[in-house]
Each structure stands twice: as C-alpha cells, then as structure tokens.
Image (tube, grey):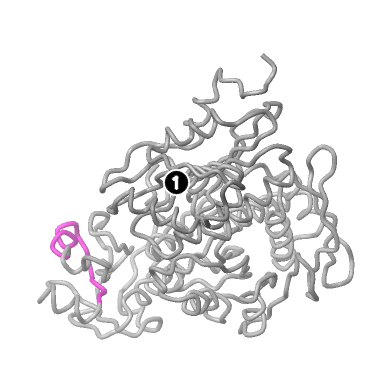
Amino acid sequence: MSATVRPRTAERELSEAFTRVSVEAIGDVRVAVSGITHDSREVRPGDIYAALPGFTTHGADFVGQALAAGAAAIVTDGAGATRMGPASIPVLVAADPRQAAGLLAAWVYGDPADDLLTIGITGTNGKTTTSYLVDAGLRAAGHLTGVVGTIGTRLGDEVLASARTTPEATDLHATLAVMRERGITAVTMEVSSHALVLRRVEGIVFDVAGFTNLSRDHLDFHGSMEAYFEAKAELFTPLHARRGVVTIDDEWGQRLSDRAQVSTSSLATTGGLADWEVMSASRVGDGRSVIELRQPDGSLALIESMLPGQFNVANLTLAHALLRTAGVSADDSVTGLAAAGGIPGRMERVSGASDPVAVFVDYAHSPDAIDRVIATAREFTEGRVIVVVGAGGDRDREKRSHMGLAASAADVLVVTDDNPRSESAAAIRAEVLAGVPESASPTCRVIERGDRRDAIALALDDAAAGDCVLILGKGHETGQEVAGVIAHFDDREVAASLLSGRPAKGAAQ
C-alpha cells in the first residue's frame, strides 16, 4: 500500500500559522489551506507545497506542477524563491524551510503528536528491534499502537511501505493525524540521525526518547563521529523530548547521559553504575534469555525472551526502561516483551528449528553490528560460523574495510554485493576485502563471489551439520539496487529456496 496517507482536515487560514513559524510572507496570506506536502506529485487542492532544497535538485523546480494540482501556498528558502520567480499564490520564505515545513505540518494537522503517547528511539544499532519490543509492551498495556521505522509504518495492523527510516515531516505529521483518527493511542518511532539533521521530526516533542548505542556509520553524511553524535544528542533536548533513557554501555552513551538537556535515566547492561542495571543474563534450556534488571527503585524485573544475544539483552532492557518511563506497569512490560516475536530481518531464522544447519538473515551493515551478530552466533553454534556480507554503494566508503575486519571473525567469510547503486560492485568488494587482515587466514577462509545468490548458495553448500550461516546486510529488504535499477531480491526467499530439499553435509540422509 502507498506510504502516503492523509487525514480528514478542516480548512484553516494560513495567516494563523504565523504564531508558530518565522517566515517572510510574499502575497496575501489570508488563504485557506488544508494540508501540506513536500512532493509536487502528491499536491492536492488547498495544500501548502514545501519546496525544499535537496541534494541534487530543489523543490522550487517543480512549483509549476504543484500550482497545476491546486497548491494554495508555497514554503521555501531564499534560493527557492529566486529560482521559482513570481508566483500567483502566497510564498513563505524561511531561513530553514525544513523546520518551517515541520512546524506548518504540525499546525495544519492539529498537532497530532500531542494526542498520542510517543516514544522515539535513536542510535546506530538496535532501533528497529527496540521499537518493536516497545510496541509489544504497549499492546500488552492495552494501547492500540502505531510504529514508524525502517521496516515500514504500521497503523494498527495496516502496514505501509517506507522509503526511509523516518519520513519527511510533512508525511510524518499526516500519518500521525491518521493514526489519531483511527483511535491509535501510542506510537513508537525510530529517529535517525538524518531525520534530526534534516528536521523530519520538527514539531514533535516525544514523551520519552531512548538511545541504544553509537558506532561508526553514516559518516558520508555527517563527516565525523563527533557530528554524528551531536545529531543524535539533539533528540535529548526540550524541543524534541520530555524525558529520556540512555544506554551507557559505550563512551557516547556516557557522554549523552551527562549532557542531556531533559530528565534522563541511565541503563547499563555490561557493568557499571546506572539507574537501570542488568544484574544477570543467561540462556536456559529452551533457548530463552532470562534477564534480571535492577530498576531505579531497587526492585528486580525478570525479563524473558526468545531473542538471542547480548545485543538483545540491551534491546530488551532499554525497551523495558522506556515502557516504564512512559507509565506502563512492570507486569505489562514483561508480559509484552515475553510475547514479542521475531523482528523481520533481525536474526530472522530461515532454516527450521530442527535443521542441522542454522541459517539467519540479519540487517547488520555496520562494523559494530556485524561484530555483535557473529558473537551472538558463537553463543549457540557448535560448528563453524559462515558469513555472507557486502557493503552498500554511494554510502560511507571508509567503513567498508572496518566491515571486512569485523566479518573476519567468522570461520568462513563470503564477500559479495549488497546494493552497489551507482558504484562499481567489484571496487566495493575490494574495499571490504582490504580490511580483512592477512593474519585472519587460515583462521578465516575468505571467498569473493559477486553474485549475491551465488554467494548465498556457496555458503549453504559449504555448511555442515552444526554450522551457522549468517546472511548479513539487507535484512528485511526485498530489492537490490544496481546502476539505478532495483530488482526484486530477498535474502530470506533466496536462502529458503536454496535450502529446500538440500540436506547439509553431515546430516542424516
């Protein structure tokens, strides 16, 4: 289903918005408006068209299309106003048009976020899993829920496709307003660093904000780890959150906990003093993780889940802390967390539970995430860990060698293509392979295989009973982008098809 949804709205006079947003108005602003969009193809009569600057184009170049569709007003920056020239409808010129668009969207749709319990989660890894866990706890507490994130946008049980982790502000406020119309009472949202820098959550003050961790990623956009951190820290200011929970297992979390501008509690899962402390974590015979978490009042919460790995200990306990901070009872929280199923593309098992080879698909595409997933597989694998991984094109090039280094912790590493996009697939693979230390061999056998299906087939053919195959990087994704063309490709479907009728070496015949 389309990712664009619109609420029912009454017309409002544009001049009333000037109490919210600082702009220079050109033309008569005593016009009626009823919506807003940044996409000229989605303009409806009565809309404000947000002509925003992009990385390669400017929304002002599409004003003609917006006018033809019935736009009632335009918001843009100075450069956009110059590009578009005189207009027949009012133009609002803002120093920061993205901020203005977000504030206008909140206004025109009646501040929907204020009528919902909102929980926003940021960090490099774990956002998606933590958001789904929080959602499970909210459902256990009786809420009708929505989720906004990497996998898509869910309104109750309806799922909408998503082009990015956090939608543009114009779409986001419209979606929240539709959620309100449908009786949804609580929303969990992944808040990416891009979203914070590009003002996609402008006009939303989250009831509770959560921080998972920070490690190398997206430096093609941010330029440095310091700038990446500053983007994440923006969520923990009064403009964006009322309260927060910060995981302090890494130095960035410790820094954020110290400097957060809103009331914030700390969570430690690997030792250290914090408001929320993991006292013990173990796996029992049926595969359940059992976690004892000391809460701020000194009481212990017993959290159980079928999700494996130390990184899921962090996700589960952060979810519990966020739920409790949001007013959910401890009983409802642990009930919801125990009932939460697997998350699409996050350590998603493709093989059967009794199959001799365990095969998982995971979204891990940063060095830290790869390291964590391999460590988790080691916890339950008697044989070898075989990894299939590649790096995406047109993204942070410098992390590729770090990904290769992290993946060399496997026994067998198959370097393949991810989404090459406009880059040379062979050049990307070479940069990943450059990070694999010479000392890794013979500890790690390294194979290069460009075709991703062939790479997965090779890994499965090589696997013997007791081994674990990890297919990393794409997770829930259902397409592969090569030279501007996106072809259907789902790691889970490919692996399942290849596994069908193919016994592993060493398995009973």
* Among the 4 quarters of the image, the one containing residue 463: top right
Q: Residue 215, relative to residue 421: is it above or below?
A: below
Q: Is residue 183 visible?
A: no
Magenta residues, as a range? 63-76
Q: Nearer the viewer, residue 91 or 308?
A: 308
Quarter of the image where one finds residue 42: bottom left
In the rendered image, the quadrant that contains the C terminus is: top right
Identity of the residue drawn at 46% across and 60% down: 401
Q: Is residue 75 magenta?
A: yes
Q: Residue at x 25, y 58 (%)?
A: 43
Residue 466: x percent and y percent? 70, 32
Q: Residues within 10 Å of mark 1 (few under 14, many from 20)?
A: some
Residue 151 in magenta?
no
Residue 351 at x, y percent in the picture: 61, 30
Q: Is residue 469 left or right of residue 51?
A: right
Q: Which residue is mark 1?
A: 160
| Above or below 335: residue 286 | above
Q: Give coordinates of residue 361: x percent, y percent.
A: 55, 41
Q: Is residue 60 left or right of residue 494?
A: left
- Residue drawn at (50%, 25%), measured in percent from left and top? 498
Task: Identify which amino acid the numbered label 1 is placed on.
Answer: Leu
In terms of secondary structure, where does tag 1 sit? strand
